Image: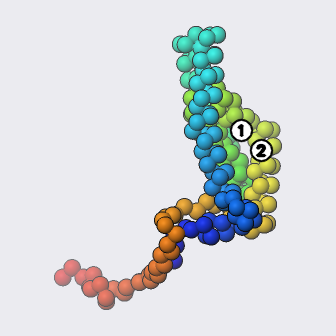
């Protein structure tokens, strides 16, 4: 069933916020995160790069950014392979590698941060690559996911058509035709 999104369907997960007259919290929080990622972070990174370039020079700043990215990529590879080995050993023992999955996502996020040019993102990425700080962040992420799962809140985002408040319903049927219906597979 396809359905367009109106105020009622958007407010279903956060009914209390909608009853107070506000919109759904998830859309507001996504907007704030996107604002932070695409506006605030680049401005902060440019400011830091300019400040470092004033102290050590422009060419040295570029070399330092490249060096940190190369070292970060090597660390991401090393940590990622270690996490993969631990996950495989957990699976071989018949256990779900939950901790390893969260660690893998954090290392993946660290890799993205390390490839983003800038000193603040590199510092955050490096902090995710060190096991002690990753363990702290893993605890926060795991508690957040556990509390959402316990309260039966959706952990995923839903995207869709938000047109004019109309609801469009449709049904589909999967057809599994037999060979006889499609014709013979013989070439002769």
Question: Residue 128 bears which disc, if any?
Answer: 1
- Say what secondary structure mark 2 lies in: helix
Q: Nearer the viewer, residue 114 or 8?
A: 8
Residue farthest along the bottom direction in this orientation: 180
Q: Which of the 4 image quadrants contains residue 157?
A: bottom right
Cα–Cα gap, marks 1 and 2: 8 Å
Question: Percent position (x, y) of residue 45?
Answer: 61, 27
Q: Say whether residue 77 is visible.
A: no
Q: Nearer the viewer, residue 97 or 24?
A: 24
Q: Nearer the viewer, residue 186 or 51?
A: 51
Residue farthest along the front direction in this orientation: 21
Q: Is residue 186 left or right of residue 127?
A: left
The correct choice, above or below, for 79 with respect to 9 in the image is above
Query: Residue at horizontal 79%, vertical 49%?
Result: 140
Of pointers 1 and 2, the one earlier in the residue sequence: 1
Question: Percent position (x, y) of residue 40?
Answer: 62, 34
Instruction: Tell whether label 2 touches label 1 (CB within 8 Å).
Output: yes
Question: Percent position (x, y) of residue 127?
Answer: 73, 34
Q: Residues within 10 Å of mark 1 (few under 14, many from 20)?
A: many
Q: Say whether residue 40 is visible.
A: yes
Q: Residues within 10 Å of mark 2 (few under 14, many from 20)?
A: some
Q: Pick the quarter of the image with the C terminus.
A: bottom left
The correct choice, above or below, for 117 with respect to 78 in the image is above
Query: Residue at horizontal 63%, vertical 28%?
Result: 44
Pointer 2 residue: 137
- Say what secondary structure mark 1 lies in: helix
């Amino acid at each position: 069933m396809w359905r367009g999104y109106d105020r009622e369907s958007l407010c279903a997960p956060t009914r209390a916020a909608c009853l107070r007259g506000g919109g759904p919290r998830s859309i507001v929080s996504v907007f704030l995160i996107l604002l932070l990622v695409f506006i605030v972070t680049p401005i902060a990174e440019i400011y830091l790069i300019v400040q470092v370039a004033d102290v050590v020079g422009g060419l040295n700043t570029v070399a330092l950014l490249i060096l940190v990215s190369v070292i970060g990529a090597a660390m991401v590879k090393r940590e990622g392979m270690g996490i993969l080995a631990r996950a495989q050993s957990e699976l071989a023992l018949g256990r779900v590698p939950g901790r390893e999955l969260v660690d893998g996502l954090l290392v993946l996020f660290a890799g993205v941060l390390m490839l983003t040019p800038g000193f603040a993102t590199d510092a955050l990425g490096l902090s995710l690559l060190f096991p002690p700080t990753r363990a702290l962040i893993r605890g926060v992420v795991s508690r957040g996911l556990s509390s959402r799962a316990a309260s039966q809140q959706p952990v995923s985002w839903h995207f869709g058509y938000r047109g004019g408040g109309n609801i469009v319903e449709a049904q589909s049927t999967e057809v599994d035709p037999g060979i006889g219906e499609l014709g013979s597979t013989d070439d002769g």
